[in-house]
Image (spheres, grey):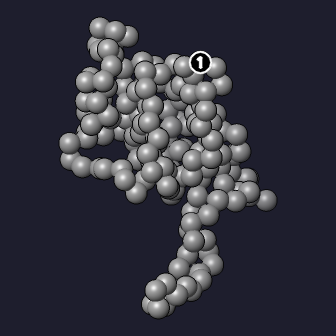
Amino acid sequence: MNDLLHSEIDSCKYLYLREIGEPRDNQLRVVVEEADASPFSESRKIAGVAFTELRPIESGENSRLFEIIWENYIAYDVMNESYARFDDYDVVQSGKLMKIYSRSHFLDYLTLASSASEGYPGPFMHYGLICLNHVVDVACPNPPTINILRPRPRPN
């Protein structure tokens, strides 16, 4: 995996999951888009309460778009962000929006629900993509390939 591109994903304020699929059997492709708070504020009334100075989180034509490909995986999971649990049990080895875990509930689940182990297929890792509205967990024996599909525009 390209550490520079991993760092570039982590430099984003927020991510939106834009695509997820298997281009071929047991290969996973994920596309995420950078997002940030709008520079324009708005007001809304919710249940009779007025909220002002709200800044929607948006992506646009100047947002970076990343493609992440795992050539093979053991398992992956997509969860509604509202139900994701983040606690002290999970140990993040590195990353902010694209985390690498050394211990996690997801890894524990795989130990119970699969035959994956240090012996088969060998050592593997847990990646977590923390997106707005979704959390994607991937267990895999090898790091992914990361490509930038839409770079940040260069200033004029």
Q: Nearer the viewer, residue 64 or 71?
A: 71
Q: Nearer the viewer, residue 87 or 39?
A: 87
Q: Position of residue 125 (x, y in %)?
A: 37, 25
Q: Residue at x 28, y 30 (%)?
A: 109
Q: Position of residue 65 (x, y in %)?
A: 65, 45
- Residue under label 1, please give it: 25
- Lateral position of residue 135 relative to residue 112, left or right: right
Seen as rendered, the residue at the extreme top is: 119
Give the quadrant of the C terminus.
bottom right
* Mark 1, other Cα within 10 Å: few <14 / some 14–19 / many ≥20: few
Compared to residue 111, the image places residue 21 above or below, namely: below
Q: Position of residue 45 (x, y in %)?
A: 52, 87
Q: Residue at x 43, y 26 (%)?
A: 75
Residue 100: in sight, yes or no? yes
Compared to residue 119, the image places residue 152 above or below, namely: below
Compared to residue 156, the image places residue 115 above or below, namely: above
Q: Residue at x 59, y 81 (%)?
A: 41
Q: Residue at x 61, y 74 (%)?
A: 39
> Amino acid under label 1?
Asp
Q: Position of residue 31 (x, y in %)?
A: 61, 40
- Lateral position of residue 138 relative to residue 148, left or right: left
